[in-house]
Image (spheres, rainbow, N blue to C red):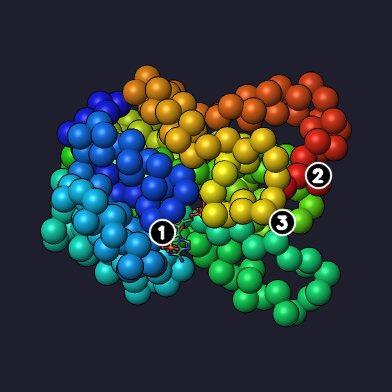
Amino acid sequence: MRLQGNKILITGATSGIGEALLDKFLSLDNHIIAVGRNAKKLDELTKRDERIIPFPCDLSKNEELKILASFIEERHPDTNILINNAGIQLNYPIIKGAEQLNNIDLEIAVNLTAPIKLTTLLLPILERNENSAIVTISSGLALVPKKQAPVYCGTKAGIHIFSKSLRFQLEHAKTKVFEIIPPLVDTHMTAGRGKNKLSPEALVEEFIRAFGKDNYEVSISKVKLLKIINRLWPAMADRIMKDGG
Ligand SMILES: NC(=O)c1ccc[n+]([C@@H]2O[C@H](COP(=O)([O-])OP(=O)(O)OC[C@H]3O[C@@H](n4cnc5c(N)ncnc54)[C@H](OP(=O)(O)O)[C@@H]3O)[C@@H](O)[C@H]2O)c1
């Protein structure tokens, strides 16, 4: 991948990993379409750099996804990279039954359905441009789950397999499919939990090196070791991750 001169749509660009991706890609001289719900934070980002194009959007809503896709088609048809980063993690006990249905709908909509739908809506536009790519963010929890968040882990396993299958389907297309598999990262999502968290900036540095070399499935930091342990000693991997942060 060429790392400069792109127009990149980043979902969840207002915080954490998305904001670190935004900062890095700006430093490499790219234009960014920044998507999030927080209009105030989007405004602040825009004041930071004129190459940021803000777009407020609740990705869990079909109508808003379609409005976003029309905006790209009409105003930014030169968008060539989509980074499906936005995500939420709601830790709740499934055993509480029906009261969890809204949490389940929201978590699946934001983490799994929205990236799949946005990919589907924007792929024809990406395909018309050079140096085009889709990037998804799964998690080490997609490979080995923890007990506090079965639905979150399920959505990330879904994104992991979706990314791999889409890469097969696009084998002869122009658009490349990348997946970032992060360990625990120090962001708003993980506030108050876990230890020895990676900084979003360190994650982004590792990803950018892999992105530039067309390394499609990018296991970040400790996830490389997790994959080895899971292959050789899966019961040990389960023990390590089960009570994870
Ligand atoms: N942090 C970790 O340890 C970790 C590990 C593995 C994977 N990940 C994944 O990395 C991605 C980024 O997470 P993060 O840690 O950077 O979390 P974060 O700091 O909480 O940021 C989440 C971003 O998602 C956006 N978002 C949430 N719901 C949305 C919605 N309905 N519509 C539009 N945007 C929405 C938020 O923007 P608004 O508030 O403006 O809507 C925010 O910008 C997620 O997919 C997460 O699952 C994180």
Residue furthest to the left:
75
Instruction: Name the foreground residue: 169 vs 131.
Output: 131
Q: Is residue 37 left or right of residue 233?
A: left
Query: Distance between the Cα atoms at labels 2 and 3?
Result: 10 Å
State the residue in front, 22 or 146: 22
Q: Give the SS element for disc 1.
A: helix
Earlier residue among tags 3 and 1: 1
Q: Is mark 1 within 8 Å of ligand 1?
A: no
Q: Which mark is residue 242?
A: 2
Q: Secondary structure at mark 2?
A: helix
Q: What is the quadrant of the N terminus in the image?
A: top left
| Residue 149: assigned label | 3
Q: Earlier in the sequence, mark 2 or mark 3?
A: 3
* Residue 152, image quadrant: bottom right
Distance, label 2 to label 1, CA atoms, is 31 Å
**Disc on res. 117:** 1
Q: Nearer the viewer, mark 3 or mark 1?
A: 3
* Count of numbered marks: 3
Which is in the foreground here, disc 2 or disc 1? Answer: 2
Identity of the residue drawn at 33% across and 31% down: 172
Callout 3 amino acid: Ala
Label 2 sits on what residue type? Lys
* Dot 2 or dot 1, earlier in sequence: 1
